[in-house]
């Protein structure tokens, strides 16, 4: 099992709370990724700008996609522990993230009614993946 998957599973059962990022206290989907970053790399690399919880939001700039591409490594081949970026509605911004698990059969994510769960990566979810990212290696001074 990947280190990222093991860390993400520690968050299972954490209640959903928009813009939060505290294991067992409250988080949203991005907060989960932020918490995994802190567990591996220490302080977050940037201050998070305000964002809305709506998955149907439309706009010109894919801010979440751009931020993920800045701090994580875009990858093509699926692997457990990768950050999955989803566009949940056609023509909407890509605004949902999760961690791939179980050889691509499942993923861990935070959703408003259930909190952090490990759910099947069913065909409806899989076809909404627009990008995959890997966490960068841990700097030697943090190992």
Image (cartoon, rainbow, N blue to C red):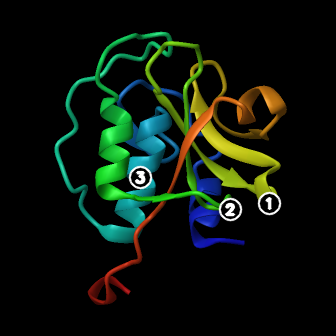
Query: Residue 103: which disc?
Result: 1
Say which label, 3 or 1, has the lower sequence index: 3
Give the quarter of the image for residue 67. top left
Q: Nearer the viewer, mark 2 or mark 3?
A: 2
Q: Which residue is mark 3?
A: 35
**132 vs 96: above or below:** below
Give the quarter of the image for residue 52. top left
Identify the residue shown where x is 65% and y is 46%: 12
Question: Residue 131: where, in percent of width, then height?
Answer: 53, 43
Please indicate whether residue 107 sits to the left or right of residue 130 in the image. right
Secondary structure of the residue carrying numbered label 1: helix
**27 vs 52: above or below:** below
**28 vs 56: above or below:** below
Identify the residue shown where x is 50% and y is 12%: 91
Q: Nearer the viewer, mark 3 or mark 1?
A: 1
Please indicate whether residue 106 sits to the left or right of residue 77 in the image. right
Question: Residue 40: where, in percent of width, then height?
Answer: 40, 69
Q: CA distance from mark 2 to mark 1?
A: 6 Å
Secondary structure of the residue carrying numbered label 3: helix
Query: Residue 80: which disc?
Result: 2
Say which label, 2 or 3, has the lower sequence index: 3
Question: Residue 47: where, in percent of width, then height?
Answer: 17, 43
């Amino acid at each position: 099992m990947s280190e990222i998957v093991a860390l993400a599973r520690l968050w299972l059962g954490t209640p959903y709370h928009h813009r939060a990022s505290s294991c067992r206290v409250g988080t949203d989907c991005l907060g989960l990724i932020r918490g995994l970053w802190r567990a591996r790399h220490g302080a977050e690399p940037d201050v998070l700008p305000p964002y809305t919880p709506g998955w149907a939001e439309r706009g010109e700039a894919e801010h979440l996609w751009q931020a993920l591409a800045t701090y994580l490594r875009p990858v093509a081949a699926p692997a457990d522990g990768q950050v999955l970026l989803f566009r949940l509605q056609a023509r909407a911004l890509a605004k949902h993230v999760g961690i791939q698990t179980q050889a691509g059969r499942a993923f861990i994510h935070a959703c408003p009614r259930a909190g952090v769960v490990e759910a099947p990566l069913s065909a409806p979810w899989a076809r909404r993946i627009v990008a995959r990212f890997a966490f960068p290696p841990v700097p030697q001074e943090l190992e």
